[in-house]
Image (spheres, rainbow, N blue to C red):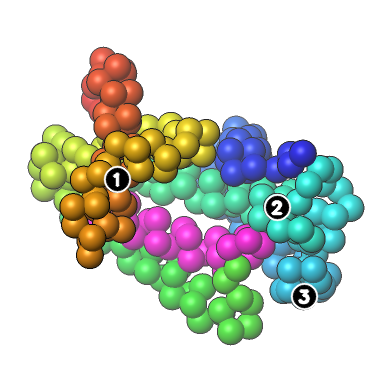
């Protein structure tokens, strides 16, 4: 049995980050805590092993301290040290949200500042990649920086396009994205727990056979549509709560 999981990583990393946020309170203190975690992880990964699947410190911790089956055989991409690294990313998300909510900058300048910070984080990760590789399965410090940079950049762009330029109202073009975003965990569970690929094949394979050259593309689009319709059902069921959240 495998005990580590993506949802487990999300839950435990959010718990660690939430505890640090409640204890630190101030933005600077939270940023310092996230920085301390990244420095600690960097030192461990540099001084205790290498960056190979079976020679990394993550792999050693997984084999000795993580019970059950390991997803990667000799390591687990959602192991204990990955959870610790992910908690720094969670704290970064809290800092970005707090800045977005409380900043007194004009909206366009706010988005520009956030996009600039995101690009700076990503470029820093890329520059360090040759020495300290960006490895998702190890959640290296550079991967955390790259993920934070990409996320912050897209957050600023979509905030500008959807909220600022549309005076706080959801743009019509963004509605499909809103359905996915509000039900992100449900989307993951639907794809993981239900055999949607088989359901998609049974429903749409006949139509896909009418277009042999485009059959893979047709089935990929129909799979996405099928999952989106399931999320739309959840969106409609939760509509009163969604309106309150948006306000």
Query: From the viewer's perspective, is the residue at label 2 or at label 1 nearer?
Result: 1
Could you tell me which quadrant the N terminus lies in? Answer: top right
- Mark 3 secondary-structure assignment: loop
Q: Dot 1 surroundings within 10 Å: few (below 14), some, or many (20 or more)?
A: some
On the image, the x and y values in percent for residue 172 come to 11, 39
- Gap between marks 3 and 1, in whole Å? 47 Å
What's the magenta region?
136-159
Residue 101, visible in the rendered structure? no
* Left or right: residue 235 compared with residue 171: right
Say which residue label 2 marks.
71
Q: Earlier in the sequence, mark 3 or mark 1?
A: 3
On the image, the x and y values in percent for residue 161 come to 17, 51
In the image shown, does 200 or 134 lie closer to the viewer?
A: 200
Q: Would you say the magenta stretch is mainly helix, strand or loop?
A: helix
On the image, the x and y values in percent for residue 79 come to 72, 50
Instruction: Look at 40% across and 61% down and name the residue there.
Output: 150
Q: Dot 2 surroundings within 10 Å: few (below 14), some, or many (20 or more)?
A: some
- Mark 1 secondary-structure assignment: helix
Say which residue label 3 marks.
50
In the image shown, does 188 or 45 lie closer to the viewer?
A: 188
Which mark is on residue 205? 1
On the image, the x and y values in percent for residue 112 come to 25, 61
């Amino acid at each position: 049995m495998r005990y580590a999981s993506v949802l487990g990583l999300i839950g435990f990393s959010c718990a660690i980050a939430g505890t640090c946020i409640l204890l630190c309170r101030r933005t600077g203190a939270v940023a310092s805590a996230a920085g301390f975690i990244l420095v600690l992880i960097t030192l461990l990964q540099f001084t205790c092993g290498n960056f190979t699947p079976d020679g990394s410190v993550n792999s050693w911790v997984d084999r000795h301290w993580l019970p059950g089956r390991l997803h990667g055989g000799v390591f687990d991409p959602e192991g204990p040290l990955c959870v610790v690294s992910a908690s720094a990313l969670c704290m970064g998300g809290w800092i970005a949200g707090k800045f977005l909510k409380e900043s007194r900058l004009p909206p366009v300048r706010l988005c520009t500042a956030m996009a600039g910070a995101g690009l700076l984080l990503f470029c820093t990760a890329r520059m360090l990649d040759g020495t300290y590789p960006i490895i998702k399965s190890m959640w290296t410090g550079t991967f955390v920086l790259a993920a934070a940079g990409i996320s912050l950049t897209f957050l600023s762009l979509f905030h500008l396009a959807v909220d600022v330029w549309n005076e706080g109202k959801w743009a019509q073009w963004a509605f499909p994205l809103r359905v996915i975003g509000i039900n992100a965990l449900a989307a993951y569970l639907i794809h993981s727990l239900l055999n949607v690929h088989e359901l998609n094949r049974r429903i749409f394979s006949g139509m896909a056979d009418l277009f042999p050259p485009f059959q893979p593309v047709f089935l990929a689009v129909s799979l996405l549509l099928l999952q989106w319709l399931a999320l739309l059902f959840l969106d409609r069921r939760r509509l009163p709560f969604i309106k309150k959240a948006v306000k």
